[in-house]
Amino acid sequence: MTLVPRLGVNIDHVATVRNARGGAYPDPARAAIMAAEAGADGITAHLREDRRHIVDEDIARIMDKIDVPLNLEMAATTEMTAIAVRHRPHAACIVPEKREERTTEGGLDVAGGGAKLADTVAELKDAGIRVSLFIAPETAQLEAAQDLGVPVVELHTGTYCDLTGEARLAELEKIRAAVELADRMGIECHAGHGLTFNSVKLIAGIPNIRELNIGHFLIAEAIFTGLPDAIKEMKKLIREARLTVY
């Protein structure tokens, strides 16, 4: 049986628009409901330390209103770990975070800071939360993730999306090799960051990628076509890519 990658829809930028005015709309919880109804297999949201996207009260509201899993992206801090343990989402993806960045700029340096992550990973696991690490498609990062005992990694696709021509194809091969290595290690592999209708197919077509997390593009596309149509089109492209492989 062909396993089509799940689609996790990140609703952060609905909250970004809301926060621009400081009001109550557009409501990210409403976006999460619409996304699930349109076929999203999960909802992703990043609670940043500066609360530029979702805010604390959004987490409980989203979890209360959806019947698909919530993947909470978070920095490995005491504050964020406590929030995750209190709400107990289905999954928590640990990501690097810098206040000055516009968006997540790259993967987590697990190889260089695995010891600092161990306590966070352990606390999340003890709370029954499925832990993943957002990493670059590099052998050293995968080996460090394996040492931490995480069941899932999410490979950063932002570099692939930013490149063109032969450089993009070379990055695609790096991602493909990382997915194959993760599979041999027994680690489930997800991917995301910067994916669009034009860039998703080659990533979705890589065997053993089990989930794609896409947000900014879908929210941007929703301005013109509506969120349900944007999600349905992305799901169609992902399915076509995987069926073409098999």
Image (spheres, rainbow, N blue to C red):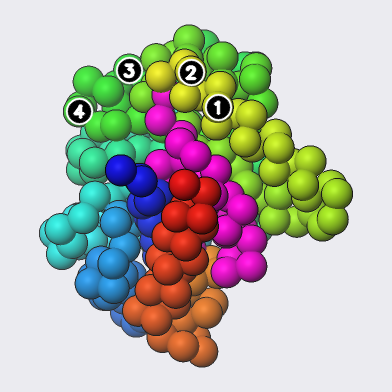
Label 2 to label 3, Cα distance in Å?
A: 23 Å
**Do the residues bearing badges 2 and 1 touch, measured as CB atoms within 8 Å?**
yes
- Which of the 4 quarters of the picture holds residue 141? top right
Label 1 to label 4, Cα distance in Å?
A: 27 Å
For image coordinates 40% across by 49% down, the residue present is: 5
**Mark 3 residue type:** Ala
Residue 99 vertical placement versus 14 (above, below): above
What secondary structure is found at the residue carrying circle 3? helix
Mark closer to the observer (1, 4): 1
For image coordinates 20% across by 28% down, the residue present is: 128
Mark closer to the observer (3, 1): 1
- Which of the 4 quarters of the picture holds residue 210? top left
**Mark 4 residue type:** Gly
First in sequence: mark 2 vs mark 3? 3
First in sequence: mark 1 vs mark 4? 4
Label 4 to label 2, Cα distance in Å?
A: 25 Å
Read off the residue under disc 1: 180
Local crowd at mark 2 within 10 Å, few (<14), some, or many (≥20)? few
Residue 185 vertical placement versus 78 (above, below): above
Asked whether the viewer can see residue 197, the reply is: yes
Read off the residue under disc 4: 128
Mark closer to the observer (4, 2): 2
- Which of the 4 quarters of the picture holds residue 66? bottom left
**Mark 2 residue type:** Arg
First in sequence: mark 3 vs mark 1? 3
What secondary structure is found at the residue carrying circle 4? loop
Label 2 to label 1, Cα distance in Å?
A: 6 Å
Read off the residue under disc 2: 184
Read off the residue under disc 3: 122
